[in-house]
Image (cartoon, helix red, strand yellow):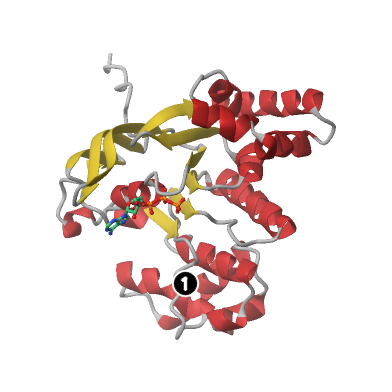
Amino acid sequence: MPPPPREDAPERYPIVITGLVNQFGEQRVHDNLELKVRRGEILGVVGGSGTGKSVLMRTIIGLQQPAEGNVEVFGRSITQAEPDEQIGVRDRWGVLFQGGALFSTLTVGENVQVPLKQFYPEIDKQLLAEIARYKVLLSGLPEEAVNKFPAELSGGMKKRAGLARALALDPELLFLDEPTAGLDPIGAARFDQLTRELQETLGLTVFLITHDLDTLYAICDRVAVLADKKVIAVGTIPELLETEHPWIQEYFNGPRGRAAADQKGGKGPSRSRSQFKAMDKRAKRRA
Ligand SMILES: Nc1ncnc2c1ncn2[C@@H]1O[C@H](COP(=O)(O)OP(=O)(O)OP(=O)(O)O)[C@@H](O)[C@H]1O
């Protein structure tokens, strides 16, 4: 009989972080940080400003070399690999950076083609253009956006264009750094919905950094909380509410947290509880 899969096998946990230390000069940002991301979940990552959420994301995708510790993505150590050894995993993730990070001199379609050309230089022009067009539509942009430059797009459209580029390589893992920041509430809710739909239809695992409480309630299966240089807790919102940590209590039980919970439920605490149950169910299904 084959041995049972390791508890932290990459099929269950595409990202496994152990003993992570990140330091800039005297400033230690992460100290012995541990985190495992489950396959197929949307993991919300929250924490006060400067707690190292973006640094954590950059470390996972190999843009930040940590002082100590290990980051495994799909069972491959990112921290110990040379950049060209990471090829083979790097095309399995897509990233939407804060602000979109689009090339301003390229059209939206050409922006989406950048990673395709990088990883598949042999693809002919016509196919490149066709794939880019498809990704733009998949991200909810109208077809004419393909030939527009970033400066011609609204904030929400720029985010979608960044998302189209993040989806260019058909990733299994999607990193979103504050995707709804700067969007009006309707635009933010639509972006959340799109994220959830893409996650479900494409079977993505999503690492989502956010300050947006509505996003956490609407689409996240679990939430990881960064504080004290570590991930101090990870779980569904009801599970987090059971922890005593003052930042967690203030964040979720403060006026904005309660408003987000109530708004999500629509009619106050009883509806919020059913929302919590739905979150619990989703998290258990993916566990
Ligand atoms: N390249 C760098 N050099 C020096 N310090 C850095 C560098 N990158 C990040 N830092 C510092 O690391 C800390 C964490 O930064 P990071 O951007 O990860 O925070 P964050 O949690 O994403 O914050 P926010 O919610 O405001 O976006 C900050 O104090 C920042 O100044």
Asked if one can make out residue 227 in the rendered structure from this viewpoint, the answer is yes
Residue 193's spot in the image, x, y percent?
Answer: 67, 50
- Nearer to the camera, 178 or 125: 178
**Residue at 20% from the left image edge and 48% from the top image edge:** 26
Badge 1, how many Cα within 10 Å: few under 14, some, many 20+? many
Expressed as whole percent of the image width and height from the top left, the position of residue 57 reads 37, 49
The quadrant of the image that shows the N terminus is top left
Write down the quadrant of residue 238 in the picture. Answer: top right
- Residue designated by label 1: 112
Q: Where is residue 74 in the image (x, y as percent from the top left)?
A: 31, 41
Amino acid type at mark 1:
Val
The residue shown at (41%, 35%) is: 227
Give the secondary structure at mark 1: helix
Q: Quadrant of residue 261?
A: top right
Q: Position of residue 136 (x, y in %)?
A: 58, 69
The one of 22 and 176 positioned closer to us in this rendering: 22
Q: Which of 31 and 195 is in front in this view?
A: 31
Classify 218 as above or below 7: below
Classify mark 1 as within 8 Å of ligand 1 or not, answering yes or no.
no
Residue with the most extreme top position: 1
Nearer to the camera, 256 or 152: 256
Tell how many labels. Answer: 1
Residue visible at 74% across and 57% down in the picture: 186
In the picture, measured across the screen, residue 95 lies left or right of residue 23, that is right
Say left or right for 186 vs 238. Answer: right
